[in-house]
Image (cartoon, helix red, strand yellow):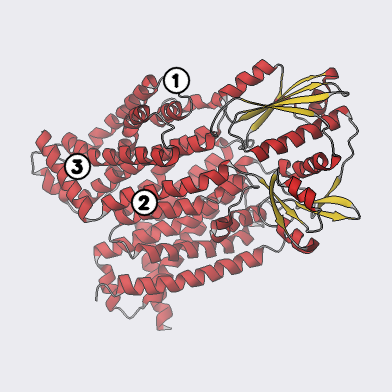
Amino acid sequence: MTATRGFYSLLKQDLVVAQRNGFFLVVLCLAVIFAILVRFVIPAEVKVTAREYVVDLTEGQVISDLLVRKGLADILLPSEEELLSLMQEDRNTLGIVFQGSREKPGAVIHYQGYEPKKALAALSAAVSSLWNEAGALGRPSFSTPVLLRPESSKLPFNLSMIPLLMVTEVVFLGFLFVAVMVFQEKAEGSIRAYRVSPRGTWTYILSKSVTNVILALCYGLLIFLPTIGPTSNLIAVLPLIILASFLMTVAGLSISVFFDSLSDFIYAALPIFVLFCLPVASYFFPAFKMPVFELIPSYPLMFGIREILFPTGKAGFYAPMLLRLAAESAVVLLVAGWAVNRNLLKEVQ
Amino acid sequence: MLRRIGNMIARDLRYASKENILIYVIVFPIVITVLLSLFLPSLEDMELTFALDPAVPREVAEGLRTYGRVQYHDGLARLSERVLEFDDVPGIYVSEGKYRVLLEGNEASYVRELPGAILDQLLYGRELVEVKMQSLGVGSSLTREFVVILTVLGSVITGGLVIALSIVEDRESRSLQALAVSPLNTLEYLLAKSALGSLIAVFLSLASALVLMGTAINYVRLTAATLSSLGIGLLFGLLIGHVAHNQLTAIAAIKILILPFTGVPVALLFIPQSIERMFYPLPMYWSFESLYRVVVATDLPIVTTNLLSICLSLAMISLLVPGLRRAFRL
């Protein structure tokens, strides 16, 4: 009972400190900026992979007809010269010139020179396939696609940024803010007062963590509500944010106690932030994944939040993800307990 | 004046060395660059992964290796499990003598279409279309170049961070009040504070370019572009130094101000050229443009872009100076 009362009074104190130091105001400002960016600035259509352009010099313009039918008229260019000049201006482009006739189909792939050989081989296969379909060349299909669940529609680019913001901004917030709280207490000497109080290490850690989880929840909701509105899926996202934010807060606490000042810690936090953000590459290029991504909590989290907010029918990932976050949090919590006790609470004895 | 500035720089250097700040500020950004340099080759050589059932004939599997990476997963259940993971990996198995491409349903369009096209190409047995390849001779992708540009701009911001935290330290430790009774004036103080941050920014940008690009870059042009971008770091540092009275408010200010300073260059990677005009009044735009000309469009001059970056950042800093004078009272 006394421990609970001690926790609540410390939590209240931490929340007041967070409020007095403008943490809630910062969260509000950032959320407003991100909501504006997502709703009004970031376009719904952005192509992050290389852009392909096509010149159709075939007899009867069979390729153009097919591309127009597929709604891809915008990738057609009138001449090879125009294609080459566009490619020279923009290195993120590839060009295909279709030529010949149904009897003698041909194509030239103009590439920049840096593309991996395997990607060019795959493009060559796609070119043959397109010629086959457009010119009815008669090559049979040797495979049948089997979908494990219904095909989903493409998510607008601006909305696809929300799961990323949840992970890189909302969840990571606690990592930084908890360090700020620790260094302030060190500077003001209040950590000395805490040491002689009956509250222990775990009360200290839990109070800091809950404060930052509350901040993260406010931040998350302030981004969600003006961008996607109060959907029922939001309820399923909140436990993920709570656990992930808790994990990052205790991680921040475990690391920050090894540094003397915020100026030192902030530079050490940068590589951790970059590491945390590396899986973003997989988010934009889903065929790309490094094995190490599986170990970084942000990897499953950003895909999981996306699936919950914009469901495509994927099932069975939610409970394992919660369990994994809970297990990671438990391990990091133990580390935090040891680190705080050794470097923060013992130091002032 | 020069002596006063020199003394101030020496004092900051002593403090930074004593508190290990110099080590942290140099080592950690270089760690990031090394991390990126290890990560970039995988991103540049991005390839498809095919999850195969072991029943897929060996010659087909070998053929698929020409187009991507091959992994084996025993049985349809395991194959489905792999396909259902978060990344886009198509599965291939044989059923009733026919090849099946197993997809989750939410893959990117190219991941949905390519496996079928590749299998058709492999299994048809002869060339359907005569495809010729012509290279423009460009040696490297834009990914690496853009990472270099962002890293250099990140170095400039890191320099700004050093300036900001140093000013905040002076404000918090009341050193500013002690300096107020010395002959040092605000301009001298700001020049001294900027020196260390600027040196660090230049060092970090050259070091990161060296790690990421080696000798494939003109370092004279890079130094010129970095020097002309220093105003951005200075602006960032002074803005934080102005609004933050202690480390807590500094972090709050950093969290908000880092957005426009890093967001503009990142946005420039994605937005169409027609919208770029919106960013013309910002020095970040011209710094990005300068660095783009150093790293990518190497035949374009950088004098104008450098000058615009310097002038715009100086104009913005000059708007800040009266406020700083009032805040610092030197």
- In the image, are marks 3 and 2 on the same chain? yes
Q: Position of residue A64 (x, y in %)?
A: 79, 23
Sequence-wise first label, 3 or 2: 2
Q: Position of residue B299 (x, y in %)?
A: 45, 20
- Asked if residue B143 is positioned above or below residue A279 in the image, the reply reads above
- The residue drawn where x is 36% and y is 29% is B225
Q: Between residue B16 and residue A261, name the one nearer to us.
A: B16
Residue underneath mark 3: B328
Q: Position of residue A207 (x, y in %)?
A: 41, 69
Sequence-wise first label, 1 or 3: 1
Mark 2 chain: B
- Residue B239: mark: none
Q: Between residue B269 and residue B178, name the one nearer to us.
A: B269
- Asked if residue A217 is positioned above or below residue B253 in the image, the reply reads below
- Quadrant housing the N terminus of chain B: top left
- Residue B300: mark: 1
Residue underneath mark 2: B28
> Quadrant location of residue B330?
top left
Amino acid, disc 1: Leu
Q: What is the distance, in whole Å, between disc 3 and disc 2 at their CAs?
A: 31 Å
- The residue drawn where x is 66% and y is 52% is B87
For mark 2, give the secondary structure. helix
Q: Residue furthest bottom?
A: A1
Mark 3 chain: B
